[in-house]
Image (cartoon, helix red, strand yellow):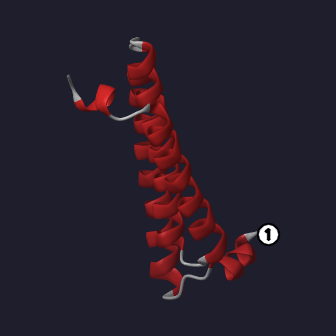
Amino acid sequence: MDIYSAVPFSAWLALSGLLFTIGAIGFLIRRDPIVMFMCIELMLNAGNLLLVASARYRAVMDGQIYVFFVMTVAAAEVAVGLAIIVAIFRQRLDIDVDEMSEMRG
């Protein structure tokens, strides 16, 4: 008997929903781009947890395959996002999400 069969699927669903909610609230409340990226990653990992749990519950490998692709896209997103944040920080020495709309032009 492994840990996945000992814990009911509803518990994995509740944990995933809680993590996603914390990430969404953090993204909407905080104005720091680094914290916003961390909240986006938390939401993606909540989705990954649900994918893996549901794949384990159904005894298929589809969830693990989807998680692999989501993690790859998330890593690329963070690399590009952090590069943009570092470039803005070097230029302005202050990073405020509300003031970044000034870059439009």
Against 72, is 35 above or below?
Answer: below
* Residue ranking furthest to the top: 60
Secondary-structure class at tag 1: loop
Question: Which residue position is annotated with label 1?
Answer: 105
In the current view of this chain or complex, which residue is farthest to the bottom? 93
* Residue 74 place in picture, x, y as percent: 46, 44
Picture coordinates of residue 21, whole percent (x, y): 59, 58
Locate the C terminus by quadrant: bottom right
The residue located at (51%, 39%) in the rendering is 13
- 53, 83: nearer the viewer: 53
Give whichever of 8, 93 is nearer the camera.
8
Tell me the quarter of the picture where residue 99 sits: bottom right
Q: Which residue is drawn at 46% across and 53% down?
A: 41
> Callout 1, which amino acid?
Gly
- Give left or right: position of 59 versus 21: left
Q: Where is residue 70 in the image (x, y as percent from the top left)?
A: 47, 34
- Residue sitting at 46 percent across and 31 percent down? 9
